[in-house]
Image (cartoon, helix red, strand yellow):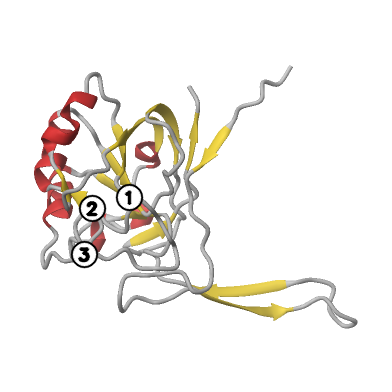
């Protein structure tokens, strides 16, 4: 007898008009074929930044000599993960905010950082991760970090200090997840990036499964 397994979809919908990083390519779609007297099918095309919606960064995104998204080991994107509610008032989630939630931590940590989410409005000043927080995760053996905001570093930073910690420690990054309404705790994460050759990122369809 098959046992039904409940999946929690943590992928926000990609839709026309959704907010993207200022200056980045917006989502657009249009029909290529439409059902009618001379056509039996609907077919559409779309264009979008690879950093729009839930996505995985490849090292190439922040390292000119880094691996591309199709070169990454898929094992990093599947397996035991812990969701931590790290919402707060400060612009950065620091080690002292989350260290008591890391005992026996699995190799994948997801952070709920956003207090509210409107996918149609760019979240100026969103809360993100301090580089020291990623360094703490590295010490605990974490190899993938995920956030429900557009980036692991603030949109006001000129550099990419959090990404540089990931670069130096070969850590994987998921961004723009939808974690509102999901309880903190341990789950199985499945968030496979599309196999897009030679690119710096790829969309994911991310889900959590109860253990």
Gap in Å between the C-alphas at discs 1 and 3?
14 Å
Q: Is mark 3 on a helix, strand or loop?
A: loop
The spot of residue 24 in percent (x, y) is 34, 75
Q: Which of marks 2 and 1 is nearer the N terminus?
A: 1
The spot of residue 29 in percent (x, y) is 57, 76
Q: Is mark 2 on a helix, strand or loop?
A: loop
Q: Residues within 10 Å of mark 3 (few under 14, many from 20)?
A: some
Q: Earlier in the sequence, mark 1 or mark 3?
A: 1
Name the residue nearer the viewer: 106 or 176: 176
Asked which quadrant contains residue 1, the reply is top right
Residue behind mark 3:
155
- Asked if residue 89 lies left or right of residue 17, the reply is left
Q: Is residue 162 above or below residue 197?
A: above
Q: Is residue 173 above or below residue 18?
A: above
Of the numbered discs in the image, which one, if any, rests on residue 114? Answer: 1
Gap in Å between the C-alphas at discs 2 and 1?
7 Å
Picture residue at 11% right of the left edge, 39% below the top: 135
Picture residue at 11% right of the left edge, 47% below the top: 131
Residue behind mark 2:
127
The spot of residue 126 in percent (x, y) is 25, 58
Gap in Å between the C-alphas at discs 3 and 2?
9 Å
Residue lying farthest to the top in this orientation: 1
């Amino acid at each position: 007898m098959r046992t039904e397994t409940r999946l929690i979809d943590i992928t926000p919908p990609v839709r026309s008009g959704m907010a993207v990083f200022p200056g980045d390519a917006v989502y657009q779609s249009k029909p290529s074929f439409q059902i009618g007297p001379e056509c039996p099918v609907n077919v559409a095309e779309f264009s979008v930044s690879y950093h729009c919606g839930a996505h995985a960064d490849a090292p190439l995104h922040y390292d000119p000599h880094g691996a591309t998204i199709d070169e990454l080991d898929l094992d990093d994107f599947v397996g035991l993960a812990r969701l931590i509610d790290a919402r707060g008032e400060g612009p950065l989630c620091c080690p002292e905010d989350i260290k008591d939630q890391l005992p026996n931590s699995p190799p994948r940590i997801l952070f709920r950082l956003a207090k509210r989410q409107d996918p149609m409005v760019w979240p100026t000043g969103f809360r993100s991760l301090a580089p020291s927080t990623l360094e703490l995760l590295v010490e605990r053996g974490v190899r993938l970090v995920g956030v429900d905001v557009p980036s692991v570093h603030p949109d006001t930073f000129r550099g990419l200090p959090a990404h540089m910690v990931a670069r130096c420690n070969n850590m994987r990054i998921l961004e723009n997840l939808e974690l509102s309404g999901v309880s903190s705790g341990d789950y199985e994460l499945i968030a496979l990036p599309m196999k897009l050759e030679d690119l710096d990122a790829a969309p994911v369809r991310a889900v959590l499964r109860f253990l």
